[in-house]
Amino acid sequence: DGGITQSPKYLFRKEGQNVTLSCEQNLNHDAMYWYRQDPGQGLRLIYYSQIVNDFQKGDIAEGYSVSREKKESFPLTVTSAQKNPTAFYLCASSTKYRGGDTQYFGPGTRLTVL
Amino acid sequence: GIQVEQSPPDLILQEGANSTLRCNFSDSVNNLQWFHQNPWGQLINLFYIPSGTKQNGRLSATTVATERYSLLYISSSQTTDSGVYFCAVYAGNNRKLIWGLGTSLAVNP
């Protein structure tokens, strides 16, 4: 089945530790995205990548880092510099096609800092 | 930059009722999408609709690009329609979506 997978589903981290969230897609999409969602809020863009080995900062990139070494993978590292990392993290991918450019989402990772 | 506003922010319905959700945007856009986020957090794309009207079962959407708004219609609502409905648009060619704050819908049995 084609789709986007994120792991783990739940993640607990101690303050001061870096943690990496996984995002993999087998849809052959060229673009991938990371969003953060806080309770009762909308989605805020952290980073996005339109092609392999290239990525751009979104609206809230401070304290986060990404890499795009393979088309199907876009891991997100939450560093100790992120002051309030507890949130729900969503990964998405998209590709342009004749009908448009639609984003598809993974199931998300809930990160809690203890 | 482009602003996306959704209304109403919250909506409570009895099962079987119809509803209309609205999305206003402040400038010309070349892509508009409607999403549904279920209570467990999964986001599903409902419609890609930069203009015109589309229907999918009990859901339909209309975008009037010249007047800068889009409407999502839900007919004969079911409890499984509960969740948050987001509208999002692309501005320019950078494929970065601008998101509204969503409409939170609760459908009661």
Image: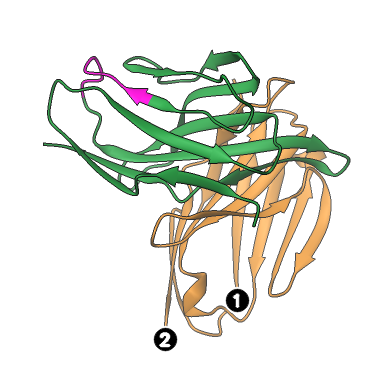
Where is residue B59? Give x, y as percent: 68, 68
Examine the image and state in which quarter residue A16 appears: top left
Residue located 43% across and 35% down the image: A22
Q: Amino acid at mark 1?
A: Asn
Instruction: Tell me the quarter of the image containing the C terminus of chain B.
Output: bottom left
- Mark 2: amino acid: Pro
Q: Position of residue B9 (x, y in %)?
A: 44, 53
- Disc 2 chain ID: B
Label the orange chain with its letter: B
Q: Chain of mark 1?
A: B
Residues tagged by mark 1 and mark 2 found on one chain of the structure: yes
Main secondary structure type of the part rendered in magenta:
loop
Instruction: Report the magenta residues as a range.
Output: A77-83
Residue B63 location, x and y as percent? 76, 49
**Circle 1 sits on which residue?**
B18
Mark 1 burial class by Cα count in 10 Å: few <14, some 14-19, many 20+: some
